[in-house]
Image (cartoon, rainbow, N blue to C red):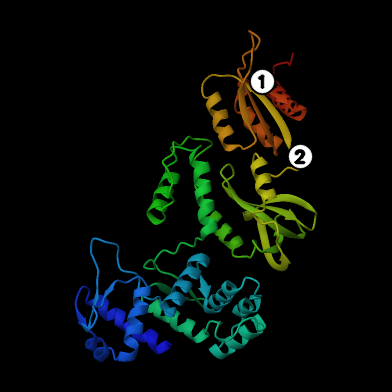
């Protein structure tokens, strides 16, 4: 079977080099050393790959038909070496910098996320230079015979592929405690994406672009995405809500560090700043807050038996565990996230009611907020008293009353908090403090 595949590759290469030409079958059998008995089977296989071959009966010729005005020819067979090299580029793109030992470890992890690859990582602290044979023994010990020998990556082959990428100028080598490898400026851009992530991308774009406008970074990003991926979406008018935002390199590094762990399928042990305990955590969702410019994990703290949010840059240590995570992206956590008014989680859901005036941009701001929220509504006050300055009512069910009160304060006297009682009390405390600051007695 291997020889037939080799013959097919060589025949296809020759035909692609001579498109729309009548090639005698004898030329293919003589130049490429293809046996006459297998040539018909090779041509049949090429046709099945999508190529158009013209082989008139008893003519003895073969013609690969192409048309420059039509779609390009199908791609040639992808070689295993190319796949391995793209894998190396992908891993260096994802992790930034890896030793060779780390590269082998991450390759094993891609084979199966349940592999305990810590043994591979631990050897990076050693001053010893491991041979390929020694590395293969460490791999066999780490995976505990989970795979057959033909499934495992060859250490020697990976080292050869890495060397070829260095010679091509795609990978840089740097001497530290061990040699480390990273992508060069010449390296092609690697964009990891799958069907789930693409669906999420489209959903977020549709939600976000309906309430945000005039934010140049978002426009630039969506334009670049359209060049790379056909998202099949219509132009939508965008409206500004909140402030312009830029994700910093530090936040991106924090996010990449966290996502390098198997948080989707396994629970993690986290050690946060100002908390001495290491808690077992199951991640429900990851999200980014424009208000704080930080990434968060909405998670169940199994140790403490409660739900909370973790700011990723406040996490000091992360440990992998063998406990399964069964809540990631579950409907419950999507619902909780939609109920949250800010990045902070609150157990209680508050039914809020706010009256607001209709002047300036007050109505527009509440309208934009309403578009963001799934549990809110705005209605006009029916038959308000003649001296009532308020024209509309905003109602919502939300978690995060403190942050909602902070939001309402930005409207000044244009809003009146009606429900719940806790919201009215928070607003009164704020207004009384303002009066005290200016020496005005509260009458």
| Mark pair 2, 1: CA separation | 35 Å
> In terms of depth relative to the viewer, which is nearer, 356 or 152?
152
Q: Label 1's element?
A: loop
Residue 244: percent from the left, percent from the top? 49, 40
Residue 228 sits above or below residue 20 on the image: above
- Check disc 2: other Cα within 10 Å, few if <14, some if 14-19, many if 20+: few
Q: How far from the left and from the top, in percent, is residue 269?
A: 72, 63
> For the residue labelled by badge 2, is the local secondary structure a helix, a strand or a loop?
loop
Residue 106 appearing in the image: yes
State the quadrant of the C terminus. Answer: top right
Question: 203 or 124, which is in the foreground?
Answer: 203
Q: Earlier in the sequence, mark 2 or mark 1?
A: 2
Q: Mark 1 points at which residue?
A: 438
> Measuring 58% from the left and 41% from the top, which residue is drawn there?
291
Please tell me in which quadrant of the rendered image residue 379 appears: top right
Identify which residue, 278 or 39, lies in the foreground: 39
Direction front: furthest residue: 57
Q: Is residue 127 above or below residue 225?
A: below
Quadrant in the rendering for residue 216:
top left
State the residue at coordinates (64%, 42%). 338
Is 399 situated left or right of 149 in this image? right
**Residue 348, label in figure:** 2
Residue 356 x/y as whole percent: 62, 21
Pointer 1: residues within 10 angstroms few (<14), some, or many (20+)? few
């Amino acid at each position: 079977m291997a020889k037939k595949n080799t013959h097919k590759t060589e025949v296809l290469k020759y035909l692609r080099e001579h498109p729309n030409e009548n090639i005698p079958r004898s030329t293919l059998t003589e130049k490429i050393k293809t046996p006459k008995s297998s040539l018909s089977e090779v041509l049949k296989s090429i046709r099945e790959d999508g190529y158009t071959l013209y082989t008139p009966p008893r003519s003895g010729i073969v013609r690969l038909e192409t048309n420059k005005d039509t779609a390009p020819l199908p791609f040639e067979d992808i070689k295993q070496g190319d796949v391995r090299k793209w894998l190396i580029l992908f891993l260096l793109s994802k992790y930034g910098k890896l030793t060779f030992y780390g590269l082998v470890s991450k390759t094993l992890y891609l084979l199966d996320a349940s592999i305990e690859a810590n043994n591979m990582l631990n050897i990076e602290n050693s001053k010893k230079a491991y041979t390929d044979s020694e590395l293969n023994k460490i791999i066999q010990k780490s995976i505990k015979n989970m795979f057959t020998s033909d499934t495992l990556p060859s250490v020697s082959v990976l080292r050869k592929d890495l060397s070829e990428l260095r010679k091509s100028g795609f990978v840089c080598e740097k001497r530290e405690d061990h040699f480390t490898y990273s992508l060069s400026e010449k390296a092609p851009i690697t964009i990891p994406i799958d069907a789930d992530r693409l669906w999420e991308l489209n959903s977020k774009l549709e939600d976000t672009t309906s309430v945000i406008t005039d934010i140049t970074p978002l426009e630039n990003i969506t334009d670049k995405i359209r060049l790379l991926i056909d998202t099949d979406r219509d132009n939508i008018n965008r409206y500004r809500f909140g402030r312009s935002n830029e994700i910093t390199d530090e936040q991106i590094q924090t996010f990449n560090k966290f996502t390098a762990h198997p948080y989707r399928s396994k629970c993690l042990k986290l050690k946060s700043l100002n908390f001495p305990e290491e808690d077992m955590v199951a991640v429900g969702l990851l999200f980014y807050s424009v208000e704080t410019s930080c990434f968060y994990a909405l998670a169940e703290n199994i140790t403490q038996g409660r739900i909370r949010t973790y700011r990723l840059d406040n996490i000091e240590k992360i440990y992998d565990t063998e406990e399964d995570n069964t809540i990631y992206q579950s409907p419950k956590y999507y619902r909780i996230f939609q109920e949250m008014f800010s990045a902070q989680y609150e157990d209680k859901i508050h039914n809020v009611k706010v009256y607001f005036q209709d002047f300036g941009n007050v109505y527009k701001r509440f309208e934009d907020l309403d578009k963001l929220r799934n549990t809110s509504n705005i209605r006009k006050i029916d038959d308000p008293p003649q001296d009532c300055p308020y024209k509309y009512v905003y109602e919502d069910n939300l978690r995060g009353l403190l942050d909602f009160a902070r939001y309402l304060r930005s409207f000044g006297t244009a809003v009146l908090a009606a429900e719940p009682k806790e919201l009215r009390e928070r607003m009164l405390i704020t207004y009384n403090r303002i009066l005290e600051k200016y020496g005005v007695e509260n009458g």
